[in-house]
């Protein structure tokens, strides 16, 4: 297992599908080279999922495909 990435400079963005009413809230940081961290905005100090850029791109493309976008 490798070293955990330094997320101190992560620029977090809340999903446009997240509501302000405390529902399911996902934040993504898109400013770190080679990785895309994802976290629960209701628990910003909690665990973070780290995706390689290509895996994140594949994931998003598959969601768009399923949604017919």
Image (tube, grey):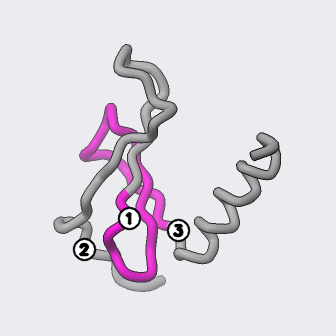
- Residue found farthest to the top: 21
Residue 46 lies in the magenta-colored region: yes
Q: Is residue 17 above or below residue 28?
A: above
Residue located at (72% from left, 50% from top): 64
On residue 51, the disc is 3
Q: Secondary structure at mark 3?
A: strand
Residue located at (35% from left, 83% from top): 3
Q: Position of residue 6 (x, y in %)?
A: 25, 74
Q: Is residue 30 above or below residue 67?
A: below
On residue 30, the disc is 1
Q: Position of residue 11 (x, y in %)?
A: 25, 59
Q: Secondary structure at mark 1?
A: loop
Tell me which numbered mark, 1 or 3, is placed earlier along the sequence: 1
- Which residue in the structure is indicated by mark 2? 6
Dot 2 surroundings within 10 Å: few (below 14), some, or many (20 or more)?
Answer: few
Distance Cα–Cα, label 2 vs label 1: 14 Å
Dot 3 surroundings within 10 Å: few (below 14), some, or many (20 or more)?
Answer: some
Tell me which numbered mark, 2 or 3, is placed earlier along the sequence: 2
Label 1 with label 3: CB-CB less than 8 Å: no
Residue located at (75% from left, 46% from top): 69
Tell me if 9 is positioned left or right of 65 in this view: left
Q: Is residue 61 above or below residue 25?
A: below
Q: Secondary structure at mark 2?
A: loop
Label 2 with label 1: CB-CB less than 8 Å: no
Q: Position of residue 21 (x, y in %)?
A: 37, 14
């Amino acid at each position: 297992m490798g070293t955990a990435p330094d997320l101190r400079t992560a620029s977090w963005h809340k999903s446009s599908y997240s509501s302000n009413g405390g529902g399911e809230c996902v934040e993504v940081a898109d400013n770190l080279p080679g990785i895309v961290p994802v976290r629960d905005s209701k628990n910003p100090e909690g665990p973070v999922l780290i995706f390689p850029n290509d895996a994140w791109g594949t994931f998003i493309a598959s969601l768009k495909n399923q949604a017919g976008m």
